[in-house]
Image (tube, rainbow, N blue to C red):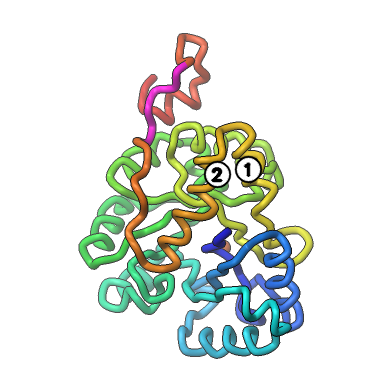
Amino acid sequence: MVDIHHHLLFGIDDGSKSLEQSVAMVQMAAEDGITHIVATPHANDTWRYDRARNEGLLAQIREALPPDTRDRMHLGLGCDFHMNFENTEDAHTNGRRYSINEGEYLLIELPDMGISARMEEMLYTMRVDGLTPILTHPERNLTLQRQPELLRGWVQSGLLVQVTAGSVTGNFGPRAEEMAWNLLRANSVHFLATDAHNLERRPPVLSVARKMVEEKLGSALAERLCISNPLAVYENKQLPAQPQAFQQPDDDDDETPSFWKRLLGRR
Ligand SMILES: [Fe+2]
């Protein structure tokens, strides 16, 4: 499996606290069946982003791994890009400073509250600049939980979506869990990722969520979300063909919950 969102770098954000912890996180991921990790530290007003420093930290982690893990695990670099003014201005000219493995794909995170009215315009500008934004964990965003229909237009115009494995398994509470599954059923998720921060509360484990998706929605979807789509991102290749998002569910009727109707853009 390929994990495109993981706070693996130590001592620079609220992720790993030490080199030893980072090594243990890589080992835990390897034991879970993860073969590729993108280290994605926060880039926002609180945590300064410095790609050269991050490359150095990643090299230290690689060097400290036991040889068998080092041989098996691919480690890449990106960031958890917050949509603030300074970042979006800089990404306009220096987008590949922030993107995954300096390719076209960029993880973007929204503020919990108060989504900018210029959001669509900012996403459009990124596309024009040659970047492909991947929205991280919309299911955990308080505004989108209340207004899931906002996502619909963004996804239909090409925005890619990453849901956190822990939301699928219920670790982020019932609202995130419900929205994660609604998005999955609406073919509106392109990636599962761990968003790992540590070994305990937010561990680098994908297999549990993958198995749940496999059991409820089929192995083809689970494989696409955990392997083929994130591998394309890691390698900066075009994503394989995706099913159409936000189609009407087969069992739609008058009893359909309003959340689902709002997600589909119907009242
Ligand atoms: Fe993150």
Describe the element under mark 2 as helix, strand or loop: helix
Please identify the quadrant where the N terminus is shown.
bottom right
Is residue 252 or residue 42 the one in the foreground? 252
Is residue 217 or residue 200 the one in the foreground? 217
Q: Residue at x 61, y 70 (%)?
A: 7
Report which residue position mark 1 lands on. 168
Q: Residue at x 62, y 74 (%)?
A: 72
Q: Residue at x 72, y 71 (%)?
A: 27
**Quarter of image, res 102:** bottom left
**Disc 1 packing (10 Å; few <14; some 14–19; many ≥20):** many
Taking 177 as reference, is 191 above or below it? Answer: below
Mark 2 is on which residue type?
A: Ala
Q: Earlier in the sequence, mark 1 or mark 2?
A: 1
Taking 21 as reference, is 154 above or below it? Answer: above
Is residue 158 or residue 233 the one in the foreground? 233
Q: Is residue 216 magenta?
A: no
Span colored in magenta: 245-250
* Quarter of the displayed picture in which ligand 1 can be seen: bottom right
Q: Residue lying farthest left?
A: 128
Taking 259 as reference, is 100 above or below it? Answer: below
Q: Nearer the viewer, mark 1 or mark 2?
A: 2
x, y percentage for residue 92? 27, 72
Please identify the quadrant where the C terminus is shown.
top left
x, y percentage for residue 98? 41, 74
